[in-house]
Image: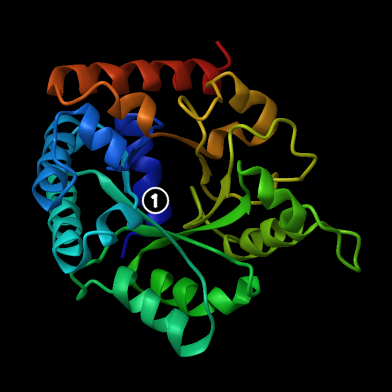
Amino acid sequence: METFGDRLHRAMEQRGPLCVGIDPHPGLLTRWGLTDDVDGLERFCRTVVEALGDRVAVVKPQSAFFERFGARGVAVLESTIRQLRDSGSLVLLDVKRGDIGSTVAAYASAYLDPSSPLYVDAVTASPYLGVMSLAPMFELAATHGGGVFVLALTSNPEGAAVQRAVGADGRTVAQAVIDEIAQLNRGAQTLGSFGLVVGATIGDTGHDLSAVRGPLLAPGLGAQGATAADLRTVFGASLPWVLPSYSREVLHAGPDVAALRAAAQRALADCRAALDGS
């Protein structure tokens, strides 16, 4: 069975190091001339899949913008996931789940079990009930070739109070998360299947990412203020593992399919230049 890390490594080599979010918030639906309802949601997602599904390495639907429409919105999410997988892109579902025991096991089953209608390649997860409270996710991901991206150093200013708090061993909470994820990736031949979320807006982190050997998802590019050039400051020697992520910067180009493709291509060119050092 091929691991998520291997699939991601190949996708980034073939399609380039780029993740594009599907974030159909009300303002964006209006900008596209769509109604803020399930019909608008469905048309929005269908257009994004048509424009980018066969071109971008990773597409990242934000679950909350589907859940707000209830069961019909989740049905659109299920359909969008199927369409993306059929198009050949990897699907990273942005859910940021985190819990303990049987509850986190149920979350794992919902997203990382191939028999689930919400089955995706990888999910985002919150470690703030303890990194190993996510063990059922890690275990099911390993069983079925999936991936988990764990929040470490996020772009939101409120995150620093928790993430940069210093524990009894002198490490920050974020560094403890980083180190535990690095342990999960030990022995990976190309790229580990367990990654971290590190915001592109945070500047020099002062944290050691060198042992992670897993993908580093970098949101915050474009509309949130970071540029591709900022990746060099944030990630330094860990640039080979970075997966830059754009949402509004690309999506604002819609609903024209050609314009969406051009926006994604510009973002990818900027990222290639930054990651290659040119």
Residue 177 vs 220, above or below: the answer is below
Q: Position of residue 240 (x, y in %)?
A: 55, 34
Q: Which of 253 and 127 is in front in this view?
A: 253
> Where 41 sits versus 99, above or below?
above
Q: Mark 1 belongs to which amino acid?
A: Asp
Q: In this view, does 173 lie above or below 247?
A: below
Q: In this view of the protein, which residue sits in the foreground, 138 or 152?
A: 152
**Relative to 185, 257 lies left or right:** left
Q: How is the image coloured?
A: rainbow
Q: Please name the residue shown 39% across and 75% down the image.
A: 108
The 10 Å Cα crowd at callout 1, few under 14, some 14 to 19, many 20 or more, is some
Which residue corresponds to mark 1?
A: 6
Picture residue at 75% right of the left edge, 32% below the top:
204
Q: What kind of element bears circle 1? A: helix
Residue depicted at x 46% and y 22% = 271
Seen in the image, is 38 located left or right of residue 145?
Answer: left
Residue 53 percent across, percent down from the top left: 19, 38
